[in-house]
Each structure stands twice: as structure tokens, then as C-alpha cells.
Amino acid sequence: MRLLIVEDEKRLAVSLAKGLTAEGYAVDVVHDGAEGLHRASEGVHDLVILDIMLPGMNGYRVCAALRAAGHDVPILMLTAKDGEYDEAEGLDTGADDYLTKPFSYVVLVARVKALLRRRGPAGGASPVHTVGDLRVDTAARRVFLADDEVTLTAKEFSVLEQLVIRAGEVVSKADILEHVWDFAYDGDPNIVEVYISTLRRKLGPTLIKTVRGAGYRLEARP
């Protein structure tokens, strides 16, 4: 399952992401409200962990905008504030649960699991992404090109997953490193190029475009 953390305290965000990744979740992290709204609106996440005090656009507004647009993704709100009024306001805007800082990491994981169980297997975006002849089932971790199944290694699949869930958008090398490897990775960043090259050999040379100086974009072959 894929989680989105929207938290401007970067050390806390990285710590939560590392812990949740170790729990077996795929985790995306952003640090401001506008970007959080954009990423949550993509419909690829199973749950959003949303701080209230965010730069640009606070968590209340992000939550309200998501609900107004019809997104039913579970939202767990985080705040340094305390008091019934804040909790009521968060829940009134459509949040599913509420956790006050400082909180126990164990409690946060329990809340996340409870919200995901409550939503059930029918919730969330479709796990099957289609781009031209390419079909990627992120739940079964299977890839098809036209009628043929393509065998990928775990890392190859993870790199492709980052591209397919944001098909048509430019995905930077830094984004791929952050989500496929880990936050502490200090090896050669050119490792991403190695995997992109391998994917091109297996999926064809035209599916993954290089956007010079920006990253890569997955798009249907003309």
C-alpha cells in the first residue's frame, strides 16, 4: 500500500517515512500544503498523513479541498495543537482520525493500520495502470506489454512503478532515488540511469523519455 506524508518538519517526515517503509508500505513525502494537495489528488495513495500547520496551505484547507473534489482517501491529521476545537475542526473538514504531537510512533502505526482495515480492499485507486500497450498491476507486481508478460526484478519494478503512477509527468532522478532506494542512500545516483536503461531494453526504447536536466517521463509510444 502507498502512503503520502505531508509534513513540513523534515526530520519528522523522514523518520516517519523510514519507519513506515520498514513496515512494508511505499511512502511518498512532501513538505507543503499545495504540493500535498497535488500529490493526494493523483488518486494513487491508500492513506494520507497530513500535518495541520503547513506552509502555503494548511492541513484543514488541503483536507477540505480533497473532500470537495470527491477524494475519499483516508486522512490521518497531525498537529502540535491540542484541544477539542482543533480536533472538531479537523474532523469537520473530512479527516478520518487525529493525532496530537508529540505522539508515539507505535500509536501512529496502529492508527494507520486501523484506517486501512476500515477502508477495506475495495478502497483506493485501481492498482492497474495502462499507458499505451503497457499495463502495470502494482498490487500483483506484474507487467504486460501488449499480450506478453515482462519479467522485472524487484528494483526494476519499483523504478517503473514510480514512473507509471505519474505517467505523463516528469519524475526526477532524486524522486526515484528517494522512493526506490531509501533516504540514506549515498551511492552513485547514476544507478537510476542503469535501471532506466534496463527498462528500455525490456519495454522498448521509446516508452521512457529523458527530459534533459529534469528527469524521466513515461508516455505511450506514438
Image: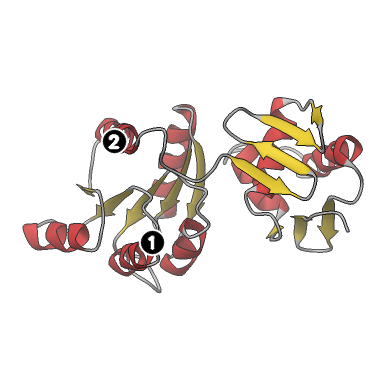
Q: On residue 8, which mark appears?
A: none
The correct choice, above or below, for 187 with respect to 84 in the image is above
For badge 2, the amino acid type reads: Arg
Q: Nearer the viewer, residue 187 or 155?
A: 155
Give the image quarter of residue 15: top left
Which label's residue is closer to the chain start, 2 or 1? 1
User: Mark 1: which secondary structure?
Assistant: loop
Q: Nearer the viewer, residue 21 or 72?
A: 72
Residue occupying the point 72% across, 40% down: 135
For badge 1, the amino acid type reads: Gly
From this viewpoint, which residue is outermost toward the bottom?
A: 56
Number of numbered discs overlaid on the protein picture: 2
Q: On residue 118, which mark appears?
A: 2
Q: On residue 70, which mark appears?
A: 1
Q: Residues within 10 Å of mark 1 (few under 14, many from 20)?
A: few
From this viewpoint, which residue is outermost toward the left?
A: 84
- Left or right, 19 with reference to 132: left
Q: Position of residue 43 (x, y in %)?
A: 50, 53
- Whole-angstrom CA distance, mark 2 to mark 1, is 18 Å
Q: Position of residue 184 (x, y in %)?
A: 58, 38
The correct choice, above or below, for 158 with respect to 62 in the image is above
Q: Residues within 10 Å of mark 2 (few under 14, many from 20)?
A: few
Give the image quarter of residue 90: bottom left
User: Mark 2: which secondary structure?
Assistant: helix
Proximity of marks 2 and 1: CB atoms separated by less than 8 Å: no
